[in-house]
Amino acid sequence: MTLVAESGNGRGRLGGLQRLTRTELREVVAGQYMNETLLLERLDELELELEDASWIRQMSQAEQEFSASGLQRLIQLSRLMTLKNPLIDHAVHIQANYVWARGATFTAPNEQVNDIVQGFLNDRNNLAEFTSHDARVGKEVQVQIEGNLFFVLWTDTETAHVTVRTIPVNEILADDGIIYNPEDDREVWFYKRRYHTKVFDFTTGQYKKKRVTTYYPDWRYLLKVEEEDLDVVDVIGASGSEHFGNVEWAAPVYHLKTGGLPNWRFGAPEKYSAFAWAKAVTRDLEDYATLRRALARWAWSLTVRGTNSVKDAKTRLGTTRTWDSPSEGNPPPVAGSTFINKRLPDGTRTADLEPIRTAGAAPNPEEGRRLWLLVSAGTGIPETILAGNAEAGNLATAKTLDRPTELQMQNRQTLWADTFRDILGYVISRTKTMTNKIPDTIDVQIRKINPETREETVESETQEIDLSVAVEFPSILEREVAQQVTAIIDAATLGGKKAAQTMPDRILVDLLLRALGLNEEVGNILEEMFPDGSMWFATDTEPEEQVVGEGAEGTLEEETAELELPDLSDLTESGFRQGLKAFREALLEPAPMRSRTKKVRVRKA
């Protein structure tokens, strides 16, 4: 079948399409379709460039800060990139694992304060949102993606119980909802939240939505109002307007922001600088995969001569499978088969089948390594870890971490430690202000030990109660346990064989427990070994003197107790307790002469 175009002299607007077969016409239409698709993609890119230009204009109007609408779109892009791009998703979760995978301990030195802290941490409502391991990892992922976390500290005015919840960032950005002191932009007064409430109507069986505006005080501003007895407002905005709303004084907000610039009111997605390069890596690998698929599909070049040869080649290479006949009557040849064709009278053949030469022309995916390096620079994750390339690593990179990356993870742990200390401090202040569970002062029994005579005296003092909270993270790097224990013992004994009084016994045991990875059990073990908050082991009675050696009557042999380091490769908790007891006896061994050499060994349980 042919297509004939008649227009005037036969060379009309169809031009070269005057006589085309159906197959040739399909190829032309396919080419035009591809051109149209390319043009549409280019139009999309131009639209994005226009949007980027509008972002720049909005930024200049907002004093070099993203506008609320621009930041909302950037957060949406960050969410999409984290879900879709494996490099961004991997970088986000690597940091979350380094920060929270090994947990943390939260303790207060005062018993009453510690009870308040543990009660808040173990509350089932707070576990679901803020204090459980899963919640802490989720919040770390969320703050990397969105750059902002708005914690609402709902406080019961009677029991002082605090429940933590989170406001979605879009509900604060909906109306640029951070209200600050006009004379000090570092002092935030309120957070304006605009959102829809969903109320289930049991009569209709459907949800009803209602637009609501609510104002929440900043937690620091709330404490300032209470301390300085400032005037407060219960309602903000004109009645009936969309800005009218109540002030929830019993629900202050703690804003945690990352990314962006320090003077910005809102944070920004942390991995934003790596988005473009992560997309470039993806496109580069997609192009490589596309070429591989093309080479796999078209591995041979077939040259035919004559119309009948074309028909013959199609018959041999074609398929018999159709939509109504799924079975294949002309299966492809097996590997090593020969393509046989006819020889023409002049000695040539009707068709030549040759493999496509790809040597030197096929791209190498390793050539895109520079793109990977820029993604690593934007995320702060080393290339060996980001790419999961075991060949690029070695024993040193397996046991350690690049120093800049280590500091990045420690910096994030410090940020979370400050966040937990602030929120726990607010919980403690609410409890102290609204209830009588925490007194103002406390009587403390202080034990003092004479380092020379080892005599202990106890003195009573009245001190202000300690409201501090300690947040401890285990070491980021996996160091050798035996080396850590050796270093701790050397610090305690100054390389000698007896205690040098360089640190209290309680601190020494604390360090040893953490070196062995018993972070969760530290508090209970210390409480058992050092009751009443004492810092030193109880002293023993004066050592007895013994005469040793036949014919050595009236003389003492000066020898020193030897301390042998234990094998810590397979130490159980019970075995560790026994070892600590023996270690304590060795440290308390007095310097004067002993009757015989005393060896202290720690055995496996």
Image (cartoon, helix red, strand yellow):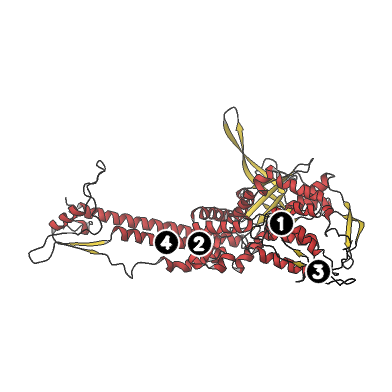
Q: Are marks 1 and 3 in contact (CB under 8 Å)?
A: no
Residue type at numbered disc 4: Leu
Q: Which mark is residue 500?
A: 3
**Can residue 426 be seen?**
yes
Foreground mark, 1 or 2? 1
Q: Reading the chain from its start, which is encountered first: label 2 or label 4?
A: 4
Q: Are marks 3 and 4 in contact (CB under 8 Å)?
A: no
Q: Are marks 2 and 4 in contact (CB under 8 Å)?
A: no
The spot of residue 550 in percent (x, y) is 84, 70
Foreground mark, 3 or 4? 3
Q: Find the distance from the CA under tag 2 to the CA under tag 4.
A: 16 Å
Q: Reading the chain from its start, which is encountered first: label 2 or label 3?
A: 2
Is residue 399 or residue 256 the one in the foreground? 399
Quarter-of-image position of residue 480: bottom right
Foreground mark, 2 or 3? 3
The spot of residue 371 in percent (x, y) is 48, 66
Q: Find the distance from the CA under tag 1 to the CA under tag 2.
A: 37 Å
Q: Which residue is mark 2?
A: 388
Residue type at numbered disc 2: Gly
Specify the farthest residue to the top.
203
Count residues near mark 4 (Cα–Cα under 10 Å), then give few for <14, some for 14-19, many for 20+. Answer: some
Residue 448 vertical placement versus 193 (above, below): below
Q: Residue at x 79, y 54 (%)?
A: 529
**Can residue 181 be seen?**
no
Residue 351 vertical placement versus 170 (above, below): below
Q: Residue at x 53, y 63 (%)?
A: 385
> Number of callouts in the render?
4
Is residue 51 or residue 404 the one in the foreground? 404
Q: Which residue is mark 4?
A: 285
Is residue 36 or residue 584 the one in the foreground? 584
Q: Find the distance from the CA under tag 2 to the CA under tag 3.
A: 47 Å
